[in-house]
Image (cartoon, rainbow, N blue to C red):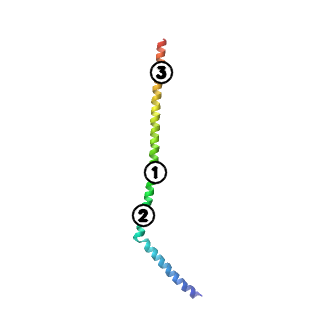
Amino acid sequence: METKDETLKSPIAISCAKAAMLLSSLKSSPNYLLESTNNDEDEEKEMMRREIGYLRLELTRERMKRRRIKLCGLMELILQVVVLMISSFFLILAFKSS
């Protein structure tokens, strides 16, 4: 029985060794390197897309912040003009009554 097992193990071992050598040669072939380069390029493109999306989001936030600041500045100016007009009105009213 051991001889049958040994005879079966030998072809299996040989085919495993051949498969290992084939895989090794495929990994070191230029096609594997080219595919690896393509995968790296795809990953880099995906990272660039994410970075661009993040930067667009940051740009939008910055624009909204600037608009808010401009709006607050405009509202402050309008409020100062209104206060100046009201104080001028009351000052004129006070001088006319005396």
Q: CA distance from mark 2 to mark 1?
A: 22 Å
**Quadrant (top left/top right/bottom left/bottom right) for the N terminus:** bottom right
Q: Amino acid at mark 2?
A: Asn
Pointer 2: residues within 10 angstroms few (<14), some, or many (20+)?
A: few
Q: Identify the residue at horizontal 43%, vertical 57% (top origin).
A: 45
Coordinates of residue 38 in the picture (x, y in percent): 42, 63
Tell me which numbered mark, 3 or 2, is placed earlier along the sequence. Answer: 2
Coordinates of residue 17 in the picture (x, y in percent): 48, 79
Coordinates of residue 41 in the picture (x, y in percent): 42, 61
Residue 65 versus residue 10 in the image, above or below: above
Q: Nearest the camera: 34 or 1?
A: 34
**Mark 3 and mark 2 residues within 8 Å of each other at the beta carbon:** no
Q: CA distance from mark 1 to mark 3?
A: 51 Å
Residue at label 1? 53
Residue at label 2? 38
Tell me which numbered mark, 2 or 1, is placed earlier along the sequence. Answer: 2
Residue 7 versus residue 72 in the image, above or below: below
How many discs mark residues in the rendered view?
3
**Mark 1 and mark 3 residues within 8 Å of each other at the beta carbon:** no
Residue at label 3? 87
Q: Identify the residue at horizontal 57%, vertical 85% (top origin).
A: 5
Tell me which numbered mark, 1 or 3, is placed earlier along the sequence. Answer: 1
